[in-house]
Amino acid sequence: DIQMTQSPSTLSAFVGDRVTITCRASQNINNWLAWYQQKPGKAPRLLIYEASTLQSGVPPRFSGGGSGTEFTLTISSLQPDDFATYFCQEYNTLRTFGQGTRVEI
Amino acid sequence: QVQLQESGPGLVEPSQTLSLSCTVSGGSLSDDDHYWGWLRQSPGKGLEWIGYIYFSGHSYSNPSLKSRVSLSVDTSNNQFSLKLNSVTAADTAVYFCARAPPYFRESSGSYYVGYFDLWGPGALVTVSS
């Protein structure tokens, strides 16, 4: 089975900061990777699919990169609404999720 | 716009069957070119994909749960459903229904189902006696 490992587990940042979250796959998943944002008590929200394609309606300060086994999610200028937990998900095989990265003040 | 809403018992006894439905509103489950899926989230296992189904009834489930999962669709009521049998405390989780757009892989020349672009709010199901 593919393992998806996110780092860091928790990230402390300020409004306006540029933040980057990393997701590593235990084997090659090409570019079949999605990123989600989740706020407490809410469902995940799709941000990016196919590693770098921005979902409709998602602000352009979010961007995704990488391929193969290493991927990144970057928020260019952190906004108050962005404090949340972020998950990566591979869909090359069994749609495995990472454990999440909490972005906090 | 399309919205999803889970419904079903919030408490299930061990060894019994967990049953949830998802109602699609603002669009037709059968006219829309999407697959419809189930996922769950628990503190211990994180987010886990359970399975997905097409309006035709074609479905595919996570191999780790496949022997216990049954998916169905009711186009007349614009609903799709999940049954998970022989539940234990490990099945306690928030269950989400979600929509999955098919995507094309050039390498195989086929369409696949992978990510989920619209989710219901979630339903907490506790397995306990």
Image (cartoon, coloured by chain):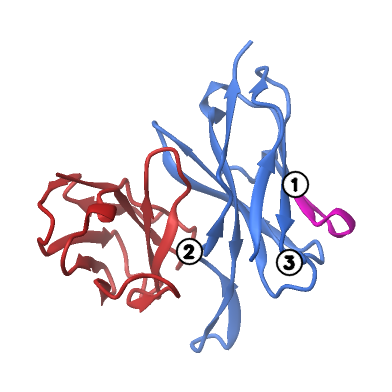
Chain colours: A red, B blue
Give the magenta range: B72-81
Give SS at disc 1. Answer: strand
Query: Is A68 drawn above or below residue B37 in the view shown?
Result: below
Magenta stretch containing residue B80, yes or no? yes
Give SS at disc 2. Answer: loop
Sequence order check, earlier mark of 3 and 1: 3
Percent coordinates x, y for residue A47 in the rendering: 38, 66
Q: Nearer the viewer, residue B79 or A23?
A: B79
Q: CA distance from mark 2 to mark 1?
A: 23 Å
Give SS at disc 3. Answer: loop
Q: Dot 2 surroundings within 10 Å: few (below 14), some, or many (20 or more)? A: few
Amino acid at pointer 1: Ser
Which residue is identified by label 1?
B81
Query: Is B7 drawn above or below residue A52 in the view shown?
Result: above
Magenta stretch containing residue B55, yes or no? no
- Give the chain letter at badge 3: B
Percent coordinates x, y for residue B31 in the rendering: 78, 73
Q: CA distance from mark 2 to mark 3?
A: 29 Å
Left or right for A93, reference B62 = left
| Image mark for residue A93 | 2
Same chain? Circles 2 and 3 = no
Query: Is A86 drawn above or below residue A76 in the view shown?
Result: above
Which residue is identified by label 3?
B27
> What's the residue at 80%, 68% (across, down)?
B30
| Image mark for residue A65 | none
Percent coordinates x, y for residue B43 in the rendering: 39, 32
Amino acid at pointer 2: Thr
> What's the residue at 60%, 15% (across, down)?
B128
Left or right for B111, reference B117 = right
Total numbered badges shown on the rendered structure: 3
